[in-house]
Image (spheres, grey):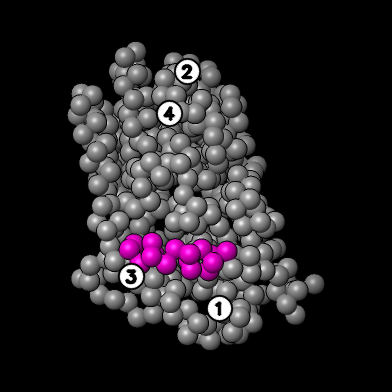
């Protein structure tokens, strides 16, 4: 029997930052295309210079509306809001697609109008409940917006004013999905509770190396990344630079480790933000200058090399819904230290491929890091287990095939 080829429109919030959510959507588009489907990506706003410049150029990402010039202050958030308001008027553009793949709000809201007007089904892929309406404890502590300027913007003020309407639209569009896919078991539990639905867990994945390198080679030599050179051994953090990620736990852990193992350094990748300045200030206060390296944006090839050669990987975010960095580290054989909480706590096997620290005891987190650093035999065992477990459960190929199965199932029901 010949497999059904689909014409798929992928909707995503925005491509304006090099984050895990953006990379996953690009990977999903590429993976479904390789499986033989016709895939097009649509978004309210895109900036290829700010969002994976080595990746986004490979995709013909289209915007729902003409782009407002970048010289307009807060144009990104206004463009997103305007797209939401005009969603009914752009629905007819998608009449010839077999299905919409709506990755996080406001994508399900736009897809809801497409289904309502031109009868195209949609699958919502959610990494979290809509944070503006359902903030986590960490969001309430740090704020949802990533700068004071954003929190005072006209768009933020309008969202607060029409919060009840947005809540209705959020609930309506998610419950109206033909299927809701959740990024992992923890997210499924959250979504089912918040939206009173029965979602399906479909965790993201990463591309494993063909072979994990020996742990001893992670501890000596230097790693060449283009014009940059990183000395081993190093501890790695790859999260977005937002306050919710709590890099300070990693800084404290490094300070603790250096008391007995002064050869280690901490490497932090990612585009810098206002939060980066706070972390750099902490580094100076703890006299760690020269022991923490901020590499900025690192392309896909080099980030994989960093994972592959890291002595261990830290996931410091205390309340993360999934933890893409955890999966990327595992498939490269990098032992992980994170919290026994939320999404990462459901991925890492404590004592087998990494350690889960007590939430949110900085001393226990640091002790777990030191435990790996001081025992090469333990670290080697964790590394091998991490690679084998990651390759077994969290590969992109498995993720693509799961997506394809769900999408084909929905379109078969349509016809």
Residue 222 forms part of the magenta stretch: no
In the picture of the structure, the residue carrying the numbered disc 2 is: 371
In the picture of the structure, the residue carrying the numbered disc 1 is: 113
Pick the residue in front: 227 or 83: 83
Question: Which secondary structure, mark 2?
Answer: helix
Q: Which quadrant, please, contains the C terminus?
A: bottom right
Pick the residue in front: 92 or 258: 92
Distance of label 2 from label 1 (alpha carbons)? 53 Å
Where residue 190 sits: x, y (%)?
A: 60, 48
Distance of label 3 from label 1 (alpha carbons)? 20 Å
Precedes in sequence: disc 3 or disc 1 = 3
In the picture of the structure, the residue carrying the numbered disc 3 is: 78
In the picture of the structure, the residue carrying the numbered disc 4 is: 311
Precedes in sequence: disc 1 or disc 4 = 1
Name the residue at 27% across, 39% down: 294
Question: Which secondary structure, mark 4?
Answer: loop
């Amino acid at each position: 029997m010949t497999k059904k080829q689909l014409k798929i429109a992928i909707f995503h919030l925005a491509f304006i930052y090099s984050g895990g959510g953006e990379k996953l959507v690009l990977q999903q588009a590429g993976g479904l295309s390789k499986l033989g489907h016709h895939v097009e990506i649509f978004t309210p706003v895109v900036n290829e210079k700010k969002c994976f410049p080595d990746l986004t150029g490979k995709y013909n990402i289209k915007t729902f509306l003409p782009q407002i010039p970048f010289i307009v202050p807060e144009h990104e958030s206004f463009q997103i809001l305007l797209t939401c308001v005009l969603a009914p008027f752009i629905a007819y553009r998608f009449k010839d697609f077999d299905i919409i793949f709506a990755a996080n709000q406001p994508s399900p809201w736009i897809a809801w109008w497409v289904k309502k007007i031109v009868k195209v089904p949609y699958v919502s892929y959610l990494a979290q409940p809509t944070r503006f309406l359902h903030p986590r404890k960490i969001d309430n502590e740090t704020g949802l917006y990533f700068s004071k300027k954003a929190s005072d913007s006209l768009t933020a003020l309008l969202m607060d004013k029409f919060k009840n309407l947005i809540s209705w639209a959020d609930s309506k569009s998610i419950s109206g999905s033909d299927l809701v896919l959740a990024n992992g078991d923890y997210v499924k539990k959250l979504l089912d509770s918040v939206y009173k639905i029965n979602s399906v867990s479909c965790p993201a994945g990463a591309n494993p190396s063909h072979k994990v390198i020996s742990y001893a080679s992670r501890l000596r030599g230097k790693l060449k990344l283009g014009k940059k050179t990183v000395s081993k051994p190093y501890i790695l953090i790859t999260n977005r630079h937002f306050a919710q990620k709590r890099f300070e736990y990693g800084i404290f852990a490094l300070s603790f480790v250096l008391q007995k193992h002064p050869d280690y350094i901490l490497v932090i990748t990612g585009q810098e933000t206002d939060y980066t300045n706070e972390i750099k200030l902490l580094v100076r206060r703890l006299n760690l200058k020269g022991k923490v390296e901020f590499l900025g944006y690192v392309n896909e090839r080099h980030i994989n090399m960093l994972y592959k050669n890291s002595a261990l990987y830290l996931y410091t975010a205390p309340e993360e819904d999934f933890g893409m960095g955890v999966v990327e580290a595992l498939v490269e054989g990098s032992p992980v230290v994170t919290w026994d909480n939320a999404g990462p706590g459901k991925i890492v096997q404590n004592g087998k491929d990494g350690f889960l620290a007590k939430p949110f005891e900085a001393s226990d987190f640091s002790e777990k890091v030191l435990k790996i650093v001081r025992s090469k035999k333990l670290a080697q065992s964790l590394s091998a287990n991490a690679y084998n477990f990651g390759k077994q459960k969290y590969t992109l190929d498995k993720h693509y095939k799961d997506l394809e199965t769900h999408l084909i199932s929905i379109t078969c029901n349509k016809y």
